[in-house]
Image (spheres, grey):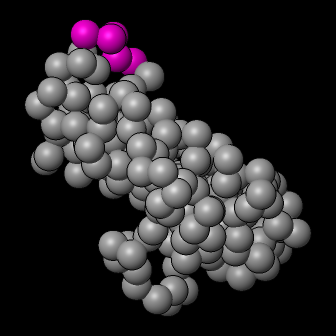
Amino acid sequence: MVYYEFSHPDDLEATLRDAPVAYVPLGTYEHHGWHLPVGFDGIKAHALCRRAAEQTGGVVFPTFFYGTGGGHVSYQWTAILEEPLIRPLLAATLDRLARFGFRVVVLLTGHYPPEQVRPPLRSCPLPGRGSGRASSGNTVHRPHRGGDHDGPPRRRLPGRSRGQV
């Protein structure tokens, strides 16, 4: 397993020969309550990509933090982009990865798959396949059961600092 941003070209070529798998973690910058960092979605996606790559080999790419969806755009410290802005970035990324020679690309989101992965991928052409469309048909998704949010942002309790119960 190698990290793309720290790799030299020879390292990437060797990894591509041995395990042509690219892991692309996706996340958002959004308020998750006072108990988690605003980049939590991307942090957990990157950690899962790293763990998978440790088992299978491959290249872990830097986290793409500007996600979409979720209805949290009004929360302070949230920076979510509209889908039309993200779609061409993901399409270009998938195209480059295919041209590099990756045979498998794992887009793993920490921001609930239906909201982050399906809409942008619906309109991303599959690289090297003419008019084909990418699909999240192989996405494993479990329904949201509370997740990592504690509801709308609110003030800390008086006299309490971060980390205190």
- In front of the other: 153 or 43: 43
| Quadrant of the frame with the N terminus | top left
Horizontal side, residue 78 vs residue 134: left or right = right
Q: Quadrant of residue 16?
A: top left
Is 146 placed above or below 63 here?
A: below
Residue 40 in the image: state x and y as whole percent.
Answer: 56, 56
- In front of the other: 50 or 69: 69
Q: Quadrant of residue 149?
A: bottom right
- In front of the other: 71 or 100: 100
Q: Which region shows up in magenta?
A: 6-10
Residue 165 in the image: state x and y as whole percent.
Answer: 60, 71
Is 20 placed above or below 117 here?
A: above
Residue at left 82%, top 67%?
A: 73
Residue at left 70%, top 74%?
A: 70
Is 21 placed above or below 38 here?
A: above
Residue 163 in the image: state x and y as whole percent.
Answer: 60, 59
Residue at left 25%, top 10%?
A: 10
Whether residue 161 can be seen here: no
Q: Is residue 100 magenta?
A: no
Horizontal side, residue 7 vs residue 163: left or right = left
Residue at left 26%, top 44%?
A: 103
Dominant secondary structure (helix, strand or loop) of the stretch shown in magenta: helix
Q: Quadrant of residue 44?
A: bottom left
User: Across the whole image, how many numbered discs are drawn on residues?
Assistant: 0
Horizontal side, residue 48 vs residue 19: left or right = right
Horizontal side, residue 47 vs residue 93: left or right = left
Whether residue 64 can be seen here: yes
